[in-house]
Image (spheres, rainbow, N blue to C red):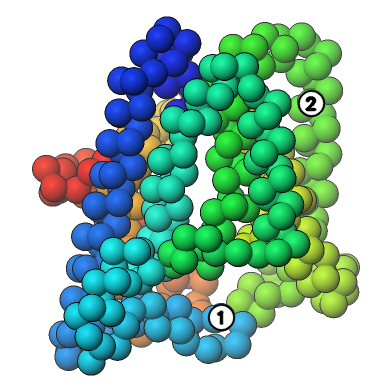
Amino acid sequence: VLGMIYGPRYKAGNAADATRSIVARALQLYRLNLVIILIFGAFLFVPFLDSTAVTAFTNQGTGEVYPLYPDTTSSLKAWIGRVVLLRSGPHQFQIIGLYVFLLALTPLVLLLLHKRYTAVVLTISWVLYILNWYAPDRITGAQFEYGFPLLTWQLTYVHGLVVGFHRERIGELLQDDRIRKAWLILCGVLFLGFAFFTQNNPNPNMPDWAKISVIPEDTFRAIYAVWFKKNTLGLLRILNYVVVLSLAYYALTRYWAIFNRWFGWYLVPLGQASLYAFVVHVFFVMVLSWIPILDEGNVVINTIGHTVALLGIWFLVKTKFLFRWIPR
């Protein structure tokens, strides 16, 4: 979307205005990050309030709990350092830290694309990805890099900018029926393969009726660790993104009237206020963690709980609750 919106501005010679707008958005996300970190950090000092769900991270596989904030007895200096450098905060919100850095780099990428250095941009992006694959490094030290290492996850972001910037040319290419059909067939076949692999996931939190066990557990875990892991952004995970997004984009385009009639009432408002929805969802996570029955693993009850939460977020968007204070 950034490539689609700001690319034409660079091409029209309005690079300065576009850069100011992008940097302003990055700073807005940074300020928002600080506010969220401080709000949930303050909850740690309320004795009767259990904020563990958002102030700590629990490894679902081992049960080990990692605190995401300094201890309440830590010095003010320690707290300021952790907050300002985005080294604390709810892990459900940490990806916004990634966006801060990626947005800050966006003007440079768009300028290079405008100067016709697309091949150079893509080459640099892949080199950084490969280097971080073999020698992982959290160059910012921020918390988000545990889940979304900057040098790794820039790959999908940069490619998104490139696609958006060259959207018209790519669209012209796909006007060829043979190319479009061949691409959709390839994506369809790969989608079925990825879906089959996914349903073999041995995760004990998945009910038996929702998975198949054709692939041995050790084999699945070995393949997943190398090719699908989120933190390292495995190559097959990236391909899976491309396949799913291509098919979803095609389906939404061709059958938009149907999708809009059935789901537009819910998804369109949330899409138009996506940042707002992402902010308030963290509060819902904490509140839902206070309801013991949702920890019992009952599929029906948990589905009802999630549905109520999702409708609650939609209701807040429709009523524009705190729209004046929470960016969208």
How far is the residue under mark 2 from the one under mark 1? 38 Å
Q: Position of residue 2 (x, y in %)?
A: 45, 28
Horizontal relation, residue 200 to residue 104: left or right: right
Q: Position of residue 304 (x, y in %)?
A: 40, 65
Is residue 268 something one can see in this rendering? yes
Name the residue rendered at 19%, 48% in the picture: 326
Q: Amino acid at mark 2?
A: Trp
Instruction: Residue 226: name its quadrant.
Output: bottom right
Front one among 91 and 85: 85
Looking at the image, is mark 2 or mark 1 earlier in the sequence? 1
Q: Amino acid at mark 1?
A: Gln
Is residue 198 something one can see in this rendering? no
Front one among 226 and 290: 226
The residue to which callout 1 is attached is 60
The residue to which callout 2 is attached is 183
Q: Position of residue 26 (x, y in %)?
A: 33, 42
Which structural element holds mark 1? loop
